[in-house]
Image: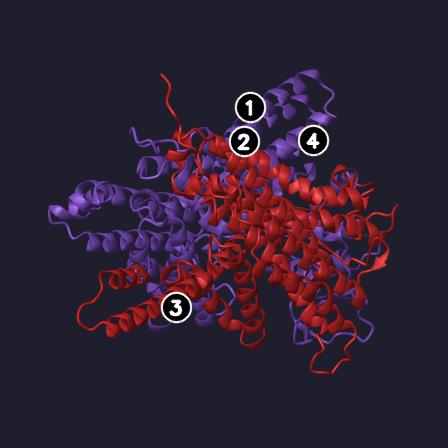
Amino acid sequence: MRATAAALSLLASFGAHALTADQAFRMAGAEEAEQRAAAITQAVQAQASQVPDARLGIFLKALADDAVKTAGGKAYIVGTDDKAVDAATGAPATLPADAEDVVNNNYLRGVIDIAQAALALSGPDVGERRTAAARLAAEPDASRIELIDKALANEQDDGVKALLERAKAASLLASDVRDQRMQAVGVLARDRTPETQLLLNQRLADEQDPAVRKVLQRALAEIADNLAWGERLGEIFSGISLGSVLLLAALGLAITYGLMGVINMAHGELIMIGAYATYMVQVAFQRFLPEALFGWYLVLAIPVAFLASALVGAMLERGVIRFLYGRPLETLLATFGISLVLQQTVRSLFGAQNVGVENPSWMSGGLALLPNLTLPWNRICIVIFAFLVLGGVAFMIARTRLGLFVRGVTQNRAMASCVGVNTARTDTYAFALGSGIAGLAGCALSQIGNVGPDLGQNYIVDSFLVVVLGGVGQLAGTVYAALGLGVLGKLLEGWTGAVLAKIAVLLFIVIFIQKRPQGIFALKGRSAEA
Amino acid sequence: MATTHPTLELPRPAPLLGKGGWTMFLVAFIGIAAIAPALNLMVPEGHWLHLSDYMIGLLGKFMCYAICALAIDLIWGYTGILSLGHGLFFALGGYVMGMYLMREASGPDALPPFMVFLDWKELPWQWSLSGSFALTVLLVFLVPGLLAGLFGYFAFRSRIKGVYFSIITQALTYAAMLLFFRNETGFGGNNGFTGFKTILGFSLNTPRMHVLLFALSGIALLGCYLLSRWLMQSKFGRVLQAVRDAESRTMFCGYNPLSYKLTIWVISAMMCGLAGALYVPQVGIINPSEMSVGNSIEMAVWTAVGGRASLIGPIIGAFAVNGGKSWLTMAAPEYWLYVLGLLFIAVTLFMPGGIVGLARQWREHRAARRGKAEANMAAAGRPSAASPSSSIIAKGARA
């Protein structure tokens, strides 16, 4: 086949300025697929040396779209309105009654695709040229070297140039000349992507020359090294991102459970309320504000989610939890009841199906760090958000009046009351704060997962485990536990799969609690009950 | 130095059940083993005394639930340890029975349908004992018992208690649920086991078999009740209650709470396993959703609603809550979660003693009123000066 292609490229040097009727017919109606492929390649190569004829591009597109018919040695392009035009001239024509459909097999589709890419190389649009060059680089073929060389000579854009160089090197990889092969490996090795790895590996399997083999092996080792780094970093990042999700979900609980000792099984539902509040803000933006402002909905959703959950939390504390302080197991049951009621309420209001929360446009896409490492923006935002919230909570507890009161009431309620702290109000504020943080978590989680009535259920067990593992009443412990579990979970996941990793993490926690019942950071004391 | 020890007179151990208790027990036994089957099988359909197949199935199910509630009461009401993992033991008992039923349904040499579907060639090791009914019955107790023993030993040894214990039992159940949801663990994955046909060669789908399973569940419930009562009246049960009320003090008195807690924990798990094994042939399906966190918590609520630390309470609670659920999920399904949720809240806030506690309060209230009335009558008899004795009676009755 290579031989026919070479022979045809000789023919091409006679120069065919424009698409002729005969050429068009050969491209569409020849008996053998090989003949048609050769005709297409020839036409494209002829074009590359001349000012390109727009008819060829249109014709190729029609071929790819199955919109070409042949009759009597001519090819016609048939539009969606059933009007035919002559493929070579573009003049309206009547379609003969005996016109036949052109059928493309997969091989021909590939050829047409590449031909279109080759044509696009001389197009005016940089983006299109880049896609075309990438397309050629992905399917190297020695017969296109001449074409790439011509494109390289005219190309001004560095990005496209680099891609073309790569495409040329990939095409030269199978060259008969040893030095060309060596050079090609050198060029390719600079591009440390999984695709190059695959390409070089394929070459290594066929390569006979020991010197080239050596160069190939060295290049492959370098690429593998680089890719391993990308993979490792990617795993660590996804671990941190999972950890920050856990941290967000557990931070509120670190206050309500860790500091106040309330076993709040409705914590997950407070997260859910935050997510639904975000959804409602989004709907309001879609409905009442111009589209240009949509990207900003999240900015408003953050305080709304906080306030919605904080309000519900305050009502719960006033209505139910206040009566159950000091009876942890009963609080657990009562708050589980609350969680059922909240779930059913959401189901009645919004339906049992998940609702759609869209990422604002600035959160879609990702940050490409390495060829095989792209960090999604929404994950990055959540990591940053989690640490901002953490900073806020730490500040609140350590530096504000409310934080002082909360700590005072937690440590010695009677004494705090004696020095004039309104303990009942402090409890309400603290619980509302913890609930509000759950709402913030919900707002963040709505950006990466489903928002539905079951949202809270997915996080409640994890949140409790994080707080228990970190040590009750220890903010730092919560942070370490969340990030540790996140990274551990993701590392195990790469090794055993998601579900087994989850089970392993759960069992790890169960065993860890046996060893250190007070968590990573135990409160120091001498109580006999400790 | 010779000292004389005063002879210590210990109170005689109370009988297992009083005269009235035994009568009630006998009535319940006859009702379950004779009257209900007769009303279902003998009385023609349409007659007002006829007990429908639906009711037999429902009551049979409730009795299994009641065993679970009783099991939770032993560990929570009497020992003060709230387990959120009893759904796991219940499901394990159910899975052991389900494996046997699956083997029967597919024939001795054939693989269960889901394994054929997964293109497996032979039974995995977990199934090796499931061919024999006797071993299955043994495993119904052993599997939950061993798991509970292992888990409980480590947990109680490190003195994990209270909420910590609840949360790690929850984690254990959650982990088990995730494991059972997987296809390659060999338990039917998502769908669990279903399509049972026979048990010991007898068809599962005859009215006689339904009634038999119903009666067996009832007898198991009565047996569990007697066992629990015997345990709780013995010294063993008293130590458990002492552990519940003041673990450190019990320890300082020379008792090692570990063995006591572990024993009751294992017994409780085994009871739940038995309930699961009786439940599965009656409902005809078992799947991992039985291990969901919510299910285990719901079991605790049956106990709380009926009344903790009383043996009849959990049974009443299981029947009341599940009866309400069956009725409401038919009448107004969307309100069931509201009712259940509000029930959780109301019971913890207003009825810490559950239904039994309410009854007890009412009885005391009546006794107090009667005492007051008697005192008033006595005072009326001697109007000059109230006798000190009568006022003491009145005060005592009111307290």
Chain where mark 3 sits: A
Relative height, residue A82 to residue A271 (above, below): below
Q: Is residue A372 visible?
A: no
Do badges 4 and 2 share one subunit?
A: yes
Q: What residue would you read off at disc 1?
A: A222
Q: Residues within 10 Å of mark 4 (few under 14, many from 20)?
A: few
C-alpha separation, residue under disc 4 versus residue under disc 2:
16 Å
C-alpha separation, residue under disc 1 versus residue under disc 2:
8 Å
Going from N to C along the chain, the mark reached first, 4 or 2, is 2
Q: What residue would you read off at disc 2?
A: A192
C-alpha separation, residue under disc 3 versus residue under disc 1:
50 Å
Do badges 3 and 2 share one subunit?
A: yes
Q: Residues within 10 Å of mark 2 (few under 14, many from 20)?
A: many
Chain where mark 1 sits: A
Q: Is residue A171 visible?
A: yes
Percent from the top left, x then y, of residue A215? 62, 20
Q: What residue would you read off at disc 3?
A: A283
Q: Helix or strand or loop: what does disc 4 sit on?
A: helix
The image quadrant that residue B342 belongs to is bottom left
Question: Which one is nearer the viewer's eye here, A79 or B282?
Answer: B282
C-alpha separation, residue under disc 4 versus residue under disc 3:
52 Å
Q: Helix or strand or loop: what does disc 2 sit on?
A: loop
Mark carried by residue A202: 4
Q: Amino acid at mark 3?
A: Val
Do badges 4 and 1 share one subunit?
A: yes
Q: Are marks 4 and 1 in contact (CB under 8 Å)?
A: no
C-alpha separation, residue under disc 3 versus residue under disc 2:
44 Å
C-alpha separation, residue under disc 4 versus residue under disc 1:
16 Å
Going from N to C along the chain, the mark reached first, 4 or 1, is 4
Q: Is residue B332 left or right of residue A481?
A: right
Q: Amino acid at mark 1?
A: Glu
Q: Amino acid at mark 2?
A: Arg
